Amino acid sequence: MPRILRDLPFFEKPTPVHLPDGSVVPVLGDQIVCWASLTLPEFRQLHEPRPFPVSIDTGFNRDFFIPERYLLEWAGLTPRDLARVGEARFENLVLPLRAATIWLHPNRPGARDAFAAGPDPFDLSADVIVWPSMIPGGRRLPLLGVHAVARAGLHFVVDGRRRRVWLRTAWRFWPFG
Amino acid sequence: MSTNPANTNQPAETDLFPRPITEEEVRELDALLGESVPPLIAGGRKAFLRDLPQLLKTHRGWCVAYSGDRRLGISRSALKLYDECFRQGLARTEFIVLDVEESHFYTHEIEILTPELDE
């Protein structure tokens, strides 16, 4: 039973996240942030991971959201690299949905911005909303939404008192090994 | 829950669903992006919606892959279907993998509560 996020902390006050390229992204208080990579759907292994911070947003009702700028700078992809598979409505806008694979990087227990040594990143299929740069109103961080968690059958637990989060795959019982 | 029709605090069920995305809106989006949904993906979506009522009875919660009108496979894992389609030599613009869930019957409306990007 792979644990993806284990004892992942989130913080009462704003905290900085340092990206491998040297840039710093502020995370607001009580935002739950983990690290993910995004690739084309045909990739089944992360040969050159490009992890970036992602907010797990229980108020976001789709799979994955990323501003075009971050898709380019952090994932190294353009919107057109990802096949367009449909549309979704956001307020008065119609936005494209694109197919991708999201890789969630297991954290080192107790740390938000350090990776666990053991388990491989967990991959899940996602419809991605790439917020076009030409439209104002993108978000501060990419978002992982509740639909992605449900689609992958994951268990998501928040310990509010300790400000810790767990994310894991479902228990499976295999009677014949 | 009250069933009294005089109770006007409850929204009508139809109010809960966003208005469908029109062909005109899709055309406007196509023009803005300079691209459209690839034909085999668009055809796959259409075939999927046609088959969805039956799929919900037999494979709710599973994933299904289509290329145009052709159903390529059905599995509990979307990633396995992707693997299978690529193994068959299909490009990523030639098929679509969809979840067998009721939400496909209505428009995907997005709600985002996270603060906007500071530019």
Image (spheres, coloured by chain):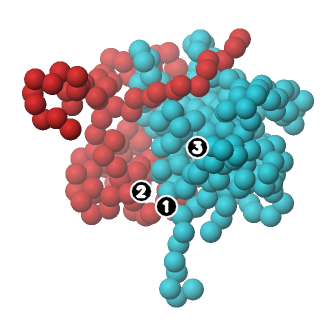
Query: What tint does the image give chain A?
Result: cyan
Q: Secondary structure at mark 1?
A: loop
List the single residue furthest toward the right.
A22
N-term mark: 2 or 1:
2
Neighbour tally class for label 1: few under 14, some 14-19, many 20 plus, Cα within 10 Å = some
Q: Which amino acid type is marked by label 2? A: Cys
Q: In the image, what residue occupies the spot 30% across and 46% down?
A: B102
Residue that mark 2 sits on = B63
Q: How far is disc 1 from disc 3 in space, using C-alphas?
A: 14 Å
Q: Which amino acid type is marked by label 1? A: Ser
- Whether labels 2 and 3 belong to a single chain: the reply is no
Q: In the image, what residue occupies the spot 51% across and 33% down?
A: A60
Q: Nearer the viewer, residue A59 or B77?
A: A59
Query: What tint does the image give chain B?
Result: red
Q: Secondary structure at mark 2?
A: strand
Residue that mark 1 sits on = B77
Subunit that carries the residue with mark 3? A
Neighbour tally class for label 3: few under 14, some 14-19, many 20 plus, Cα within 10 Å = many
- Whether labels 1 and 3 belong to a single chain: the reply is no
Q: Secondary structure at mark 3?
A: strand
Q: In the image, what residue occupies the spot 63% across and 48% down?
A: A159
Q: How far is disc 2 from disc 1 in space, using C-alphas?
A: 6 Å
Q: Nearer the viewer, residue A97 or B71?
A: A97
Q: Which amino acid type is marked by label 3? A: Ala
Residue that mark 3 sits on = A100
Q: Quadrant of the N terminus of chain A?
A: bottom right
Q: Nearer the viewer, residue B95 or A160?
A: A160
Q: Tell me where residue A136 sits by quadrant.
A: top right
In the image, taking residue B19 as reference, residue A62 lies left or right, namely right
Residue A157 lies, in percent from the top left, at: 59, 51
Subunit that carries the residue with mark 2? B
Say if B34 sits above or below B66 in the image.
above
